[in-house]
């Protein structure tokens, strides 16, 4: 298949490129105050463009738009009630909005825009992940905590997960998009082996199994467990995790997700501490984490001071309150409701979102969930394009 870029696609490509550069830029480049100021200006400008385009095309005039608006209002209330971390909290609201709106805009467009824009994003993410992987290989025999081009082990995992997700989506849409998929797998495989992170290994295995299933059931309905049931299982596991009086269940979770450690008992203590403290400000929480303590040694007290809950749900209720937790849960179940097709992109997007949520059992990452939600919302649209004759307008340069 030959790919050509249409003239009107170039605007979406430039917007996608600018977004991915300023919003997913590695921490390596954020060590200079002048650079940070420029990045903030670009972020504000891009967010304004996204908002104007969304309002102009009426993309949020549905139940999802209403819930996103309520989520943002709830976070802004949190910022008002917590002056010391108001800036960080407002930044979190802006990040969530930008993540959601960019892919909402892209996926609501025609298929040529979707393919070219996602290819552009994947190209940049794969490049920075590849640099991060090479740096990890170079420092593999050292105990240097600054070995990550992407800032941290979690920052690396977030980028690797999203790279693999985009590569799968593009591979399902366009068969010839194999280079991006191979690079994504290679990056995450090397990272999982060298860092010995159980969560990443599980992600890698599950994504590979999903891809295999997709190829076997190409263009056919797949009778797999749907997202609404997966969400019920996810919340059930969280309830067991929070309410269990026995450390054995928590230790199992820790061992499965982070088998590089002999013991992570501090996570149990963190979860108990943050849940207990959240009850003192139940409605709107304590505000977003501060980065003031990021250079302290990795230990329990640093995580307490940073507000690093090591669990996405506890992150929500501690930092933003139970009001936001309820709104977010409603959004997830509405996104999962009434999906009519059981084809490739819909199923894969649902499972990718579920995998990310399960990773949130042991790590923060609430805002990144909004990168995946638009794909679940528009999964049926993408599947409808797959079911038609492949009349894709494909870009001449292979970004991924």
Image: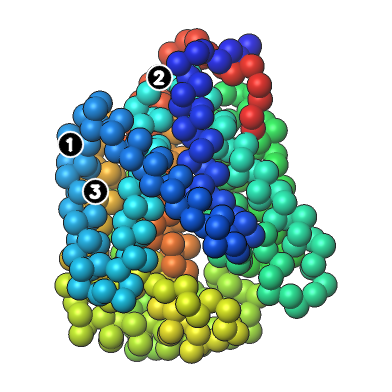
* Residue visible at 24% across and 27% down in the picture: 56
Give the class, few, some or many, for how many residues have Cα within 10 Å of label 1's Cα (few <14, many ≥20). Answer: few
What residue is pinned by disc 2?
Answer: 110
Residue 99 or residue 192, whichever sits in front: 99
Q: Please say if 324 is above or below 300.
A: above
Q: Does residue 351 sit above or below 52 in this rendering?
A: below
Query: Number of numbered discs present?
Result: 3
Work out whether residue 369 or residue 258 is closer to the camera in this orientation and state it. 369
**Which of the 4 quarters of the picture holds residue 196?**
bottom right
- SS label for mark 3: helix
Residue with the mark numbered 1: 62
**Type of colouring:** rainbow
Residues at marks 1 and 3, CA–CA distance in whole angstroms: 10 Å
Which residue corresponds to the image point at 51% horizontal and 28% vertical from the top-left? 13
Q: Which residue: 19% across, 65% down?
A: 77
- At horizontal 79% and vertical 67% (from top left) the residue drawn is 139
Residue 260 percent location from the top left of the image: 65, 75
Residue occupied by mark 3: 68
Residue 105 drawn at (x, y percent): 36, 32
Counting residues from the start of the chain, the first of labels 1 and 3 encountered is 1
Res 233 visible: no
Which of 230 and 145 lies nearest the eye of the viewer? 145
Per the image, label 1 sits on a secondary structure element best described as loop
Which image quarter holds the C terminus? top right
Q: Where is residue 123 drawn, in percent x and y?
A: 62, 36
């Amino acid at each position: 298949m030959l790919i050509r870029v249409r003239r009107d696609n170039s605007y979406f490509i430039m917007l996608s490129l600018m977004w991915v550069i300023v919003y997913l830029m590695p921490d390596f480049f954020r060590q200079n105050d002048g650079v940070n100021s420029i990045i903030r200006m670009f972020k504000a400008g891009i967010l304004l463009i996204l908002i104007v385009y969304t309002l102009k095309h009426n993309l949020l005039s549905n139940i999802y738009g209403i819930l996103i608006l309520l989520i943002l209002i709830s976070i802004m209330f949190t910022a008002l009630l917590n002056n010391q971390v108001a800036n960080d909290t407002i930044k979190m609201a802006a990040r969530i909005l930008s993540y959601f709106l960019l892919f909402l805009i892209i996926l609501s467009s025609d298929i040529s825009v979707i393919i070219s824009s996602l290819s552009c994003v994947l190209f940049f993410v794969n490049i920075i992940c590849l640099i991060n992987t090479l740096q990890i290989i170079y420092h593999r025999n050292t105990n240097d905590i600054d070995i990550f081009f992407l800032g941290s082990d979690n920052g690396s995992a977030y980028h690797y997960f999203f790279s693999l997700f985009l590569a799968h989506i593009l591979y399902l849409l366009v068969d010839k998009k194999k280079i991006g998929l191979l690079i994504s797998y290679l990056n995450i495989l090397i990272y999982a082996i060298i860092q010995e992170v159980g969560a990443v290994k599980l992600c890698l295995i599950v994504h590979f199994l999903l891809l295999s299933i997709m190829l076997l059931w190409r263009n056919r309905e797949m009778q797999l467990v749907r997202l609404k049931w997966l969400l019920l299982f996810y919340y059930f596991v969280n309830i067991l995790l929070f309410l269990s009086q026995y450390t054995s269940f928590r230790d199992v979770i820790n061992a499965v997700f982070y088998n590089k450690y002999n013991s992570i008992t501090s996570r149990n203590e963190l979860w108990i501490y943050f849940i207990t403290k959240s009850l003192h400000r139940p409605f709107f929480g304590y505000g977003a984490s501060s980065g003031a303590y990021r250079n302290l040694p990795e230990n329990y007290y640093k995580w307490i001071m940073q507000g690093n809950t090591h669990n996405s749900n506890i992150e929500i209720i501690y930092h933003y309150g139970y009001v936001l937790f309820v709104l977010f849960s409603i959004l997830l179940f509405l996104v999962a409701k009434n999906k009519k097709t059981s084809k490739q992109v819909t199923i894969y997007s649902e499972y990718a979102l579920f995998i990310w949520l399960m990773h949130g059992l042991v790590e923060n990452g609430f805002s990144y969930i909004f990168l995946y939600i638009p794909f679940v919302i528009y999964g049926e649209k993408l599947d409808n394009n797959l079911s038609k004759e492949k009349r894709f307008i494909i870009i001449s340069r292979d970004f991924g």
